[in-house]
């Protein structure tokens, strides 16, 4: 947020948010922040996070959900921003998509003053789709990897960091997806499955830190199972985004 200020997004999975009134929420946050910034490894960050938690009188919580865009069926009305389409806040893509929606819609209205609103929104839905798909799918896929509830997802997360740390095109194009500047769904799938194949390599070569050990046949099996897990993470979201 500034040179001396940062913002922390804490993801608390599950259907029920721990109660703030009973102090349960603060305990959960305290434990997870302590795990993310251990006192002995990063004492300054640990102290800053704990004092921010102690100083905040009220913790603001927002539920996160994935809402794919649907075609507009109401004459004369246009839904934009979160009213139309919501993704996970992890990648901070909501404003990007909302503002691009405005840009595309105003361009269409300016270029085609003769079209009625139904035609304009039909055209607009197609124009916004590739960018929205890339940003939305990435937010859901990265959330699954970062939350890493299984060994396979932890392996994919490790491969993802390894991939992004390679620099040049391995970093530039994924940054382009996140910022909404590279609205190319096929390229997104290419990078996602490149990460998945890197995870396969890390597992088979037994160089993974997050999923080490086991004999070669078991490593082979788990490596290809990880590929299946990767497909299961991304393809259902892509499918939902492709619905008219
Ligand atoms: C934790 C979190 C972090 C995020 N971080 C980022 C980020 O870093 N970058 C980014 O680009 N995006 C981020 N987003 C997403 C971004 O905040 C949203 O996509 C964006 O705010 C959507 O704007 P909007 O105008 O569509 O909706 P909103 O910002 O939700 O605005 C809707 C407004 O309508 C008002 N309203 C609701 N109902 C009524 C009613 N009946 N009558 C009158 N007013 C009403 C609400 O009070 C609200 O002020 C984040 C989201 C979350 C939850």
Image (cartoon, rainbow, N blue to C red):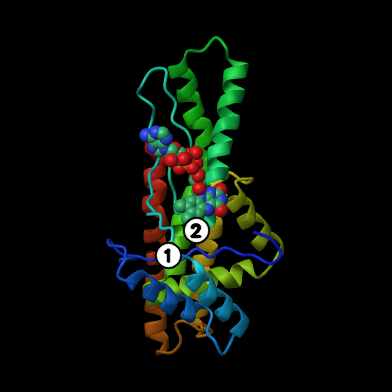
- Tell me the crowding category of disc 1: few under 14, some 14 to 19, or many 20 or more residues within 10 angstroms, Cα based: some
Of labels 2 and 1, earlier in sequence is 1
Q: How many marks?
A: 2
Q: Residue at x 58, y 53 (%)?
A: 178
Q: Element at badge 1? A: loop
> Residue lying farthest top?
114
Q: Are marks 2 and 1 in contact (CB under 8 Å)?
A: yes
Element type where label 2 sits in the image: helix
Q: Tell me how far mark 2 sits from mark 1, CA to CA.
A: 9 Å
- Rendered position, 172 above or below 153: above
Q: Is mark 1 within 8 Å of ligand 1?
A: no
Q: Eyeballing the image, is 230 above or below 119?
A: below
Quarter of the image holding residue 240? top left
- Residue positioned 39% across, 42% down in the render: 68
Task: Name the foreground residue: 194 vs 182.
Answer: 182
The quadrant where residue 140 appears? bottom left
* Quadrant (top left, top right, bottom left, bottom right) of the N terminus: bottom right
* Image: 64 above or below 43: above
Q: Whole-percent x and y of residue 156? A: 47, 70
Percent across and percent down for residue 132 are 50, 42
Residue at image location 43% in from the left, 30% down from the top: 79
x, y percent for residue 222: 38, 77
Query: Which mark is on residue 70?
Result: none
- Can residue 104 be seen here? The reply is yes
Identify the residue under disc 2: 90
How packed mark 2 is, by other alpha carbons closer than 10 Å (few <14, some 14-19, many 20 or more), is some
x then y, percent, for residue 234: 42, 56
Nearest to the observer: residue 117 or residue 30: 30
Name the image quarter holding the C terminus. Answer: top left
Q: Residue 11, labelled with which disc?
A: 1
């Amino acid at each position: 947020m500034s040179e001396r200020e940062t913002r922390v997004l804490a993801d608390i999975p599950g259907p029920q948010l721990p109660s703030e009134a009973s102090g349960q929420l603060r305990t959960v946050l305290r434990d997870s922040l302590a795990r993310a910034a251990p006192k002995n490894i990063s004492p300054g960050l640990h102290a800053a996070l704990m004092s921010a938690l102690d100083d905040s009188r009220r913790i603001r919580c927002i539920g996160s959900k994935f809402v794919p865009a649907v075609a507009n069926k109401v004459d004369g009305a246009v839904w934009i921003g979160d009213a139309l389409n919501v993704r996970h806040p992890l990648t901070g893509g909501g404003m990007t998509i909302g503002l691009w929606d405005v840009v595309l819609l105003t361009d269409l209205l300016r270029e085609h003053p003769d079209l009625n609103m139904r035609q304009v929104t039909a055209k607009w839905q197609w124009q916004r789709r590739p960018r929205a798909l890339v940003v939305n799918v990435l937010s859901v896929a990265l959330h699954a990897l970062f939350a890493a509830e299984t060994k396979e997802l932890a392996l994919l997360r490790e491969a993802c960091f390894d991939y992004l740390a390679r620099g040049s095109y391995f970093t530039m194009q994924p940054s382009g997806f996140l910022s909404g500047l590279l609205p190319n769904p096929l390229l997104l799938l290419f990078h996602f499955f490149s990460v998945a194949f890197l995870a396969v390599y890390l597992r088979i070569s037994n160089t993974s830190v997050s999923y080490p050990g086991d004999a070669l046949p078991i490593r082979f099996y788990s490596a290809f199972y990880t590929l299946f897990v990767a497909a299961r993470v991304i393809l259902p979201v892509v499918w939902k985004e492709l619905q008219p």
